[in-house]
Image (cartoon, grey):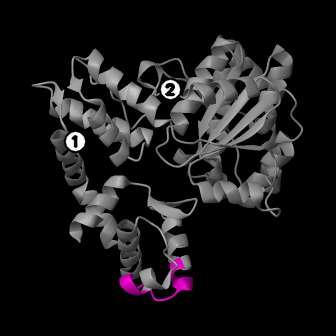
Amino acid sequence: MENPFVYGQSVLGDAFTDRRREIDYLFHELQSSARIFLISPRRYGKSSLLQVVKQKLVQDGLLVAYVDLYKIASMNQFADAYASAILNAADTKIERAIKAVLEMLVRLRPKIAIESTGVASVTLDYSFQSKETWQELEEVYQLPERIARKKGTRFVVMLDEFQEASIIGGDVLEKQLRAVVQTHTEVSYVFAGSKRHLLYEMVHDEKRPFYRMGEIFNLGKIPESEMADFVLDRFSRTGYKVELSTVEQIINKMRNIPYNVQLLCHRLWAQTRDRKVITDEDVALAIRSLVYTYEAIFGELWDNLTVYQKRLLRAIALSKGRNLFSSEVIVRYGLETSSSVSKGLSLLQKKNLIERHDDHYEFNDIFFERWILERG
């Protein structure tokens, strides 16, 4: 019997946790000329949500291209990935799509290969050493609008982890994308990101090209009652017994973060396969087991931090991320000054170790936090 809890990949279909309201909102908004900045903390299921919405839009007859910028390290890779995503979304008849792209990207001399899975990949002939190449690259960004007009249907472009654009191509890429996007009437865009402070800067800093470019949509947590229903249903349909109070404990200890809940439940399901009964003691054991699983990773991460960063992380763990600028916390944990705390928090955010939530800071990885607490 297959484990019903899925993590570490895009979660689709029956394994996807609720999000009906978010799906409906994005589905309807993207059917008109929309530019949405989807901002979400890590592990809230942002990428899975985009994939579910993509499926729904495609079923409704729209063309949808998805590009994950987190996997891209250079402008060459970005241009190829963008063109490939547009090509694969353009037509179910891949031969027709190839012909259209070849006609539209004449100057960039595209080379197209078809993989065994039927997916097409595009490699463009260019070098980003010249100004002319950057200008020619505009042809790639114009592809979805031109295809949408030609086919008489709306195109949707989803750029996941969009904050990485500034790293990939700097200010030039942001400016070029902005200049093209603002002219499109037949293409809707989703600019999604999990490094919230970076994406907020892109949208709120008036000096940045994407300043007030579109609507901000913050992805929040799934209501605890709905998450509990999801967990109970997945356990019960595979013959497992678990009390509601135990499920509520799982959700509470995992801070109701979808990825963490799925991960812990996955471990619990495997851990109790022989008796199919889950208790509070099993939950505690599974959490300790997961912390131990990542021991080597956490140890290496810890060794690469400065003494002050370690001190600050301990303070966040022990104080639950609250009142970090108070004299009491600064003195208790040896944090020196409030300006040192501010600088330290900024660096830890850039390292993607913590995130600010309203009036407090939280670890992005709950198990890393528990590992630190266990070390004293």
- Which element type, helix, strand or loop, lies under badge 1? helix
Q: With 345 as the anchor, is 163 left or right in this view?
A: right
The quarter of the picture where residue 60 lies is top right
Q: Nearer the viewer, residue 65 or 141?
A: 65
Q: Residues within 10 Å of mark 2 (few under 14, many from 20)?
A: some
Q: Which residue is mark 2?
A: 18
Question: Over which residues does the magenta segment extend?
Answer: 331-341
The quarter of the picture where residue 80 lies is top right
- Which element type, helix, strand or loop, lies under badge 2? loop
The vertical placement of 74 against 192, above or below, is: below
Q: Amino acid at mark 2?
A: Asp
Q: Quadrant of the C terminus?
A: bottom left
**Residue 317 location, x and y as percent?**
36, 66
Contact between labelled residues 2 and 1, with CB atoms less than 8 Å apart: no
Q: Which mark is residue 283?
A: 1
Q: Is residue 333 magenta?
A: yes
Q: Amino acid at mark 1?
A: Val
